[in-house]
Amino acid sequence: MIDLVIAGLGNIGLPFVDFVSRIPGVRSVVLVDPDAFTENNVSCQMVALSDVGCPKVDVAAARMAEANPALRIETLRCRLEHVPRCLYRGRVIASCLDSRFARASLSDIAWTVGAPLWLDAGVRPEGRLARASAAFPSHAKAAGICCGWSPEDWNLAAREYSCAGAFEGAPSRSPAFLGAMAAAVMAHRLDCFIANDLPPSADARSWVVSLDAHRSWTTSIRRSSDCRCKHQSWTIEPLGHSAETCKLSDLTEAGLLAVPGMPVTRALRCDCGSVRGSFHIAARLPENLVHCDSCGGKMSSGALDLFDEIDLSALEDFGPEVPALALADLGVSNGDIIRLGKRHFEVGVSVLFQEGRV
């Protein structure tokens, strides 16, 4: 039995969840997507008009539950890098994304947690091409899917990341049948993995089908020194405390605190000129904090307001109340992996077991 994370629920992801719910051997699924369906999606994705305006994770979860009531399903309406990293540990990761930058981010996540398998799918309308790829992050010296990228691919990935930290990859606008084809190829690879017919290897692999040419290809991707993904595996220890009970003052001996991939902001700014002090993970700011009291607009952080590490020896510099804050007050969730000094710790492991999430 395997546990699965599916990131992206559009042209490929939605038919993929239909296939997954019917594959024996899948025990639980975490669905990740920040968006809701729009009218434009109806013409190129397997979605009904009645689903317009609904969160993609909710629509996908309902379809999976109807097809397989025994399946354990969790939904997270957020970007993939904001998912508590513990939820990727020990799970097969399947990505159905339209952004190179998102793929590169997921590559780093998969390697840090040592995912047993990372499946990725994509389409190209020209030539009616559908692709599924497989990499094995837990394998020593394994190649990643991004190891096959050219310098132009990396340049395009950089353009997809805005100063606000948002992915801006363009939707493929591919026909629904092409997305379903890519989903079918990836579902077949998942089924092979469950049946032990897809053994781990150092090389990543891709399977490409051209509907126009009536041809298919299988290729291998080797580890590349030009790949900009880190391919770093972390040794992760249990913190022994939940996010709600662990205070920042309890961690001062570690020197530095970081939540990898999620910088903390010390100020929020509005176009009207208002400034509000803050001490919170920028990506997880509650709605009441980003609402400007002066004009009602949305506040955001400037580049100089963000920092990746917190100096635990100087907490009072951020305010006299900061040392008494719990990790949860900072926006840390149970299941996040934090870095204390040079060591990585998993927050609230026992709490997640009690909730049945791991």
Image (cartoon, grey):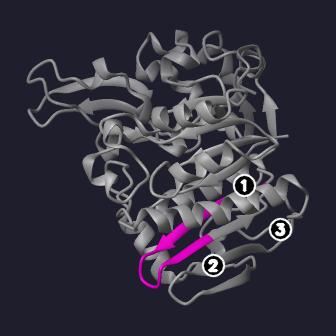
Q: Secondary structure at mark 2?
A: strand
Give the residue displayed 74% in from the left and 20% down from the top. Answer: 356
Q: Is residue 120 magenta?
A: yes
Q: From the top left corner, tell me how far across and down residue 288 is, in percent.
A: 29, 17
Q: Residue at x 75, y 79 (%)?
A: 222
User: Could you tell whether 78 is left or right of 205 in the image?
Assistant: left
The reply to whether the C-beta atoms of the residues labelled 2 and 1 are less than 8 Å apart is no
Report which residue position mark 2 lands on.
Answer: 208
- The three-letter code of the residue at mark 3 reads Lys
2 or 3: mark nearer the eye: 2
Instruction: For the residues labelled 2 and 3, say whether their Cβ atoms are less than 8 Å apart.
Output: no
Going from N to C along the chain, the mark reached first, 2 or 3, is: 3
Picture quadrant of residue 34: top left
Q: At which x and y percent is residue 318?
A: 42, 22
Left or right: 53, with 63 as reference point = left
Q: Where's residue 272, x and y in %?
A: 8, 33
Tell me, for residue 111, which label it has, or none: 1
Q: Secondary structure at mark 1?
A: helix
User: Label 2 to label 1, Cα distance in Å?
Assistant: 24 Å
Point out the stretch of residues depicted in magenta.
Answer: 117-131
